[in-house]
Image: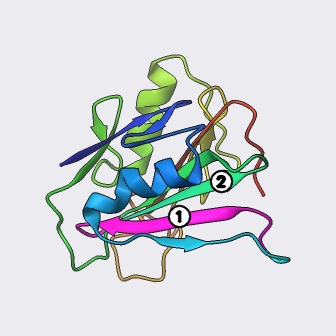
Amino acid sequence: MQFVLDPPHGVAPVRLGMTLPETVAAVSAWGAPRVHRADAVRPFDLVSTAYDGIGFQAVLEGDGRVTAVTLWGPDEDEDPDVTVLWDGLDVFRTPAADLLAHAAGRGLAVADADPRAPYLPGLTLAFTRDTSQDVPRDATGLPLHFTSVLVAGEAYRER
């Protein structure tokens, strides 16, 4: 199985702009997704599920349509048969530094002032390297690989 990141369109089977029923139907083949309705603390709906160790979450804002999709990498003791690809690279198995160098080599802007949460502003593709798991780390103490990735539309603003 492959999840292909397609910024700013989404991550199949979830496309940005889908409604809540469309999103739930798209991910239901993996099991019953959890739907978290907006409340006073979180002013947006979430649909969350997992597939073979990869966490998958869609954010639905405003008019109740998907505005962002986040995927989480597997736990350190898991080796799923799933790849999460961006531009042909496996996001959770390619070293973070190599993935960012690849983006820069393609002429994409890389915003990495915060090495824990670099992003590609032209694509609204954001990564994190935070985890409490016992994973290989670089000299600065950061995980060698990204632990999550967010795909959103051009107008997305971090919450």
Which residue is situated farthest in the front direction here?
21
Which residue is situated farthest in the top direction here?
107
Q: Residue tagged by mark 2?
A: 60
Looking at the picture, which amino acid does disc 1 mark?
Val
Q: Is residue 158 left or right of residue 115?
A: right
Which corner quadrant holds the C terminus?
Answer: bottom right
Which percent across, then down, holds residue 144? Answer: 39, 60
Which residue is situated farthest in the left direction here?
81
Q: Residue at x 61, y 46 (%)?
A: 66
Q: Residue tagged by mark 1?
A: 47
Q: Residue at x 45, y 58 (%)?
A: 24
Q: Residue at x 28, y 31 (%)?
A: 88
- Residue range of the region highlighted in magenta in the rendering: 42-53
Q: Is residue 46 left or right of residue 80?
A: right
Mark 1: few/some/many CA within 10 Å (<14, 14-19, 20+): many
Vertical comparison of 45 with 17: above or below: below
SS at circle 2: strand
Q: Residue 8 versus residue 36: which sits nearer the camera?
A: 36
Lower sequence index among marks 1 and 2 = 1
Q: Is residue 110 magenta?
A: no
Asked if labels 2 and 1 touch by Cβ distance under 8 angstroms, the answer is yes
Q: Residue at x 41, y 29 (%)?
A: 102
